[in-house]
Amino acid sequence: MDTFVLDSHTVTSHTDSLRADAAALTSLPGTSFPSFYPFTAFHEAYAAAASAAETRAQQVRDEARRVAAFMDLTVTAADTVDGNTSKGLGGLL
């Protein structure tokens, strides 16, 4: 049987750090480039890249928060199982 140890304080520290990192992701600064020739293509490329980066950053934020929530849930479930097992074994001894 595989076993593993979850230290709830360590996991809480990691999930807090993960949430802080997600919150620290900031938007790209608004930079306006001229949209007239010869800068038209650069302006359009930058706008598309900035939009894609912002979308991806939001996805990363959401995923980091989701992972942190599941990590917390896993620790809570493990603590509950451990506590119930200990109570059950205590009743047998």
Image: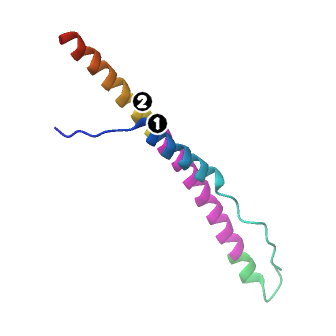
Disc sitting over residue 76 in the figure: 2
Rendered position, 63 above or below 51 = above
Callout 2 amino acid: Thr
- Taking the spot 45% from the left edge, 41% from the top edge, the residue there is 11
Prevailing secondary structure of the magenta residues? helix
Total marks in image: 2
* Dot 2 crowding, Cα within 10 Å, few <14, some 14–19, many 20+: some
- Image position of 47 (left or right of 77): right
The answer to which image quadrant residue 38 occupies is: bottom right
Residue 51, image quadrant? bottom right
User: At which x and y percent is residue 9?
Assistant: 46, 37
Q: Could you say which is closer to the camera, residue 54 or residue 42?
A: 54
- Residue 3 percent location from the top left of the image: 23, 38
Q: Find the residue positioned furthest to the front.
A: 93
Question: Which residues are the magenta region?
Answer: 46-69
Q: Secondary structure under badge 2?
A: helix
Q: What is the three-letter code of the residue carrying label 1?
A: Asp
